[in-house]
Amino acid sequence: MSSIDDATADSSLTGRELLLDAAESLFYERGYQSVGMDEVRAASGLPLKRIYALFPGKEALAVAMLDGRDRRWHVSLAEHVDHYRSPSQRVLAIFDWLSDWLAGPGHRGCAWINAHGELGGTSEAIRGAAQRHKDRFRAYVTELATEAGAPRSIADAIFLLAEGCMVTAGISGSPEAAGQARRAAQLLLQHGATG
């Protein structure tokens, strides 16, 4: 699995793509408030006039970056899960994917949790981007857990296990929480099947 955190820069990328890649790399590595638009300009190679023609400000750029990252994150997750046929294995595959993602080079926690923690209290747009990502992930987990025969309460618990392992790994720097969450999810699925 290739890391979604790697910014790709080649001659086929548009100015918008170059800008979003540069912003994602800088914002994810250093945070949103500490990165100035001059740094984004230097990293993207685009003049400020072009940047502001694409996005009216740093907040709009951050939201577009988070939304693009969300699409790639979910595609990568679904591609991994789709390798499995058994409904319960499809649920557990979420945690296997998370373990690989959390162990990836340069991993600094969940980009949406980070953005919300830094700016969610002052930016409705950032809060909205984080909420969209989490709602989409919750719906995906719920769909898979329901297909595995789990009631909504267990689907909710599995979602919280996934979220908790991301937060824990972001703070500890270790992907071990994904394995622990996987084992707990497996117990929940077994309980749901027999309960």
Image (tube, rainbow, N blue to C red):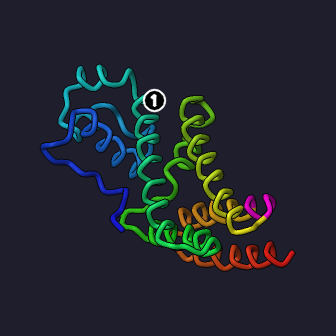
Can you tell which quarter of the image residue 15 is in?
A: top left
Residue at the spot 44% in from the left edge and 62% down from the top edge: 79
Residue at the spot 39% in from the left edge and 24% down from the top edge: 57
Residue at the spot 42% in from the left edge and 35% down from the top edge: 64
Q: Is residue 106 left or right of residue 113?
A: left
Q: Position of residue 65 (x, y in %)?
A: 40, 40
What amino acid is labelled 1 in the image? Answer: Glu
Q: Position of residue 122 (x, y in %)?
A: 60, 30
Vertical position of residue 179 compared to residue 64: above or below: below
Q: Is residue 4 left or right of residue 147?
A: left
Q: Is residue 113 left or right of residue 6?
A: right
Q: Please give the residue where the numbered disc 1 appears in the rendered image.
A: 59
Q: Give the main secondary structure of the magenta stretch.
A: helix
Q: Position of residue 112 (x, y in %)?
A: 53, 47
Q: Nearer the viewer, residue 138 or 79?
A: 79
Can you tell which quarter of the image residue 162 is in?
A: bottom right
The N terminus appears in which quarter of the rendering?
Answer: bottom left
Q: Is residue 179 left or right of residue 30?
A: right
Report if residue 73 lies within the magenta region: no
> What segment carries the magenta color?
151-156
> Which residue is outermost to the left?
11
Vertical position of residue 175 compared to residue 16: above or below: below
The C terminus appears in which quarter of the rendering?
Answer: bottom right
Task: Using a 10 Å C-alpha cutoff, classify the residue at mark 1 as few (fewer than 14 neighbours), some (14 to 19) or many (20 or more).
Answer: some
Residue at the spot 55% in from the left edge and 73% down from the top edge: 85
Vertical position of residue 128 compared to residue 158: above or below: above
> Which residue is outermost to the right?
195
Vertical position of residue 137 compared to residue 128: above or below: below
Q: Nearer the viewer, residue 181 or 145?
A: 145
Q: Position of residue 132 (x, y in %)?
A: 58, 40
